[in-house]
Image (cartoon, coloured by chain):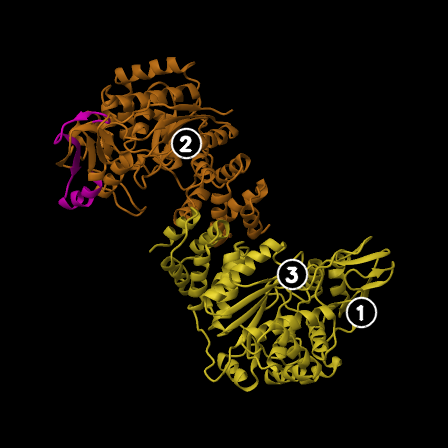
Chain colours: A yellow, B orange
Amino acid sequence: MQAIDLIRRKRDGGALDREQIEYFVRTVTDGTMPDYQASALLMAIVLRGMTTEETAWLTDAMVRSGVRVEYPDVTGVPVDKHSTGGVGDKTSLILAPLAVACGAVVPMMSGRGLGHTGGTLDKLEAIPGFRTALSLDELRAAIRSIGCALIGQTAEIAPADKRLYALRDVTGTVESIPLISASIMSKKIAEGIGGLILDVKTGSGAFMKTIEDSRALARSLVSIGTAAGIRTEALITPMDAPLGTMVGNAVEVLESIHVLRGDGPEDTRDLSVALAARMLVAAGISASAEAAEQSVRAALGSGAALEVFRRIIENQGGDPRVVDDDRALPIAPREHPVPAWRDGYVNLLAARIGDAAVSLGAGRARLEDVIDHSVGIEIIARQATEVRAGDTVLLVRYRSDEQLARSAFLLEQAVEITETPPLTRPIILERIIND
Amino acid sequence: MQAIDLIRRKRDGGALDREQIEYFVRTVTDGTMPDYQASALLMAIVLRGMTTEETAWLTDAMVRSGVRVEYPDVTGVPVDKHSTGGVGDKTSLILAPLAVACGAVVPMMSGRGLGHTGGTLDKLEAIPGFRTALSLDELRAAIRSIGCALIGQTAEIAPADKRLYALRDVTGTVESIPLISASIMSKKIAEGIGGLILDVKTGSGAFMKTIEDSRALARSLVSIGTAAGIRTEALITPMDAPLGTMVGNAVEVLESIHVLRGDGPEDTRDLSVALAARMLVAAGISASAEAAEQSVRAALGSGAALEVFRRIIENQGGDPRVVDDDRALPIAPREHPVPAWRDGYVNLLAARIGDAAVSLGAGRARLEDVIDHSVGIEIIARQATEVRAGDTVLLVRYRSDEQLARSAFLLEQAVEITETPPLTRPIILERIIND
């Protein structure tokens, strides 16, 4: 088999067969396919697409490029959740302890933020001492002892994805539903889970802007998961304004803890409860979504979920005082209000708030950028609130004048004041299961 | 400027601006753009296309990646011809001396054969001692002294094309009219010519199979040449059966010499005369195509063209006896007839005859293959001839049983015997000039 034949076939709109896809993944992983051939093939895939079958084979080959973790001591079905990324989306931090408090086992591998959406690992690392770089042995030990670990992708998990993603990132070949699906699902399948709830964001602040694109991505992800024997479903949820009231790292941990205390903003709580409930159903713990929601709300009300989060933090070397004392989180001391410039209704533009947070230092424009976990943006006037000129809409938490100056221009564009209230959408738009 | 921005723009169907195209060519040539980015961009160009303007800018940037040759001592307009490649197409060897015998100046840079079509350099090198690797100084000296040189591309000519072609060859990105056009025309423009006649082949044995594709390529080539200030026109000519009666290297030199002696097959002669006449008009030597054809036929009849060929061969170190003595050419001694298997009409499939010649050793399947200049295929029964079962259709000239065995399978497929004569097309189908 020769790389050039695969490239020509895909270039001309043909489908690759299983053997060709395995050849591609194997030779990309071991480095015998030169990068220039891999990138030409990736561009042909971006522009010509892949069938459902090709995407499933690609995912499977990527899983088998590394280890598929097993948990021999665990009874029950390990479950996880994945979000395609939104601004202020801290639900992973909430629903992992929530699901575990209700009896689930959650081996959660997350990523770092890039661009205007944050990453779960970055948020967790805002907790003093918290280690996300656990080995597979440490992961298995954590699952045995407390039923949960919140960690980064290890080197053994889908190494093909690491190589492919690095190449896609510099060759303009990220934007492809089959490639995105295979990248997400190969890592999730390799984690060793039996159930997966996907939160596919849609809207101006999401990777997928339209409901049609989001639906296509959701269907692709669900079909791959199902083909791999995982109980998979996707919720399509809006990402027009940020989720909740905090955007950043330490500030998002703070909001998560507030929700785990039974408090916090309603939208963050409701979405976390809905996702955690779906995880319980997928894990076979609850018989219905309604029963699951009852358990989940009880775990919030009783403080049981907060206790699980405390154990997770302790187990991964973090300072557990953060769950009791808001001041234990390193939140930047200085505050700068962004006021409404006229009377009207608040329209928060998620992508621009995300960009402003990145320029402030809370996220990365490039992979090598260093994050300041302490900075962030607090939303004082929520989406569609009526305000008067001069009312504070956003409160920026920052450390240096330079940070504030760098983000000033984007902050100004992040809030619109409209004459009529912007339309808001329900927190869950659609549920996608395998047809 | 960043490579990724160019890639994304082209991937999304946009047009690159002049500065972006110059950046691409400059960084590909100096090696600062990694191959994996260049190949992703090339694949996006293959699948998204390029506007006429983008193609002209690309060509211009490729020309300026090297030297544009000048001939300060030459009065008149240097002219050249380029063929997109056909089986048995030896017209360059004939019309260069023919046009020079009529007063033209012809600095002809040619390429080597790859795949089923032959290359002028390979054919010339069948002449014992003939050197095609002349320096630019030697080229200019030859133009001064005899008005012609038949050489390969020097390192100073469009080095961007060399790098791009090497990458396109291994990344499935050869098949693109804008990229093909820029590759051909950058080399021709850099040669320093003021007139150019293009022979765009069409049909099953050509790179472009349909008249529509051939027309699109011809238009693209003519528009680039015109934009570069070169009097450019294209003839679209059929390539269904091979041109003439010889396919190979030494055997094609033999046929060329026969035509220069005023003999040889009619189709080869007529096409050479037509192309040479168009060159004389483009050079401003003849006022009309009719007058030009008269001069050209006179130069054939008088032996003047043959004398020019002798001088070219002498000037480039070749054995000039080949023009007088057919036995001075190294033609393989053994002959193998391929007979008609039934009564009917001969249909010669150019591409398969070309492939058979390659497998015999007359051409290259890969760039690194070594050619046997002495082997070839002689067509005994021309296209559409009526034959009886057992009549010889092809005569294979070979040296070793191994060569013959290697090509036997393809030779068998190269000739069809049909019940009705295959349709033949006129030697010139269309003439394309700039609109």
The answer to whether residue B127 of the structure is visible from this angle is no
What is the x, y in percent for residue A185? 50, 66
Asked whether, in this view, residue A98 is left or right of residue B123, the answer is: right
Rendered image quadrant of residue B357: top left
B109 and B220: which is toward the camera: B220
- Vertical order, A348 against B378 (above or below): below
Distance Cα–Cα, label 1 vs label 2? 68 Å
Question: How many marks can you see?
Answer: 3
Query: At numbered mark 1, what does the secondary structure look like: helix, strand or loop?
Result: strand
Distance Cα–Cα, label 3 vs label 2? 52 Å
The local crowd at label 2, few if under 14, some if 14 to 19, many if 20 or more residues have their Cα within 10 Å, is many
**Which one is closest to the eye, mark 3 or mark 2?**
3
**Which one is closest to the eye, mark 1 or mark 2?**
2
The answer to whether residue A134 of the structure is visible from this angle is yes
Image disc number at residue B156: none
What is the x, y in percent for residue B42? 48, 47
Rendered image quadrant of residue A339: bottom right
| Segment tinted magenta in the rendering | B382-411
Query: At numbered mark 3, what does the secondary structure look like: helix, strand or loop?
Result: loop
Residue assigned mark 2: B214
- Vertical order, A61 against B19 (above or below): below
Image disc number at residue A429: 3
What is the x, y in percent for residue A338? 81, 62
- Classify the position of the N terminus of chain A by image quarter: bottom left
**Badge 1 amino acid:** Glu
**Badge 3 amino acid:** Leu
B423 and B243: which is toward the camera: B423
- Vertical order, B162 against A162 (above or below): above
Residue visible at 32% across and 29% down? B92
Residue assigned mark 1: A335
User: Magenta stretch: residue A410 in it?
Assistant: no
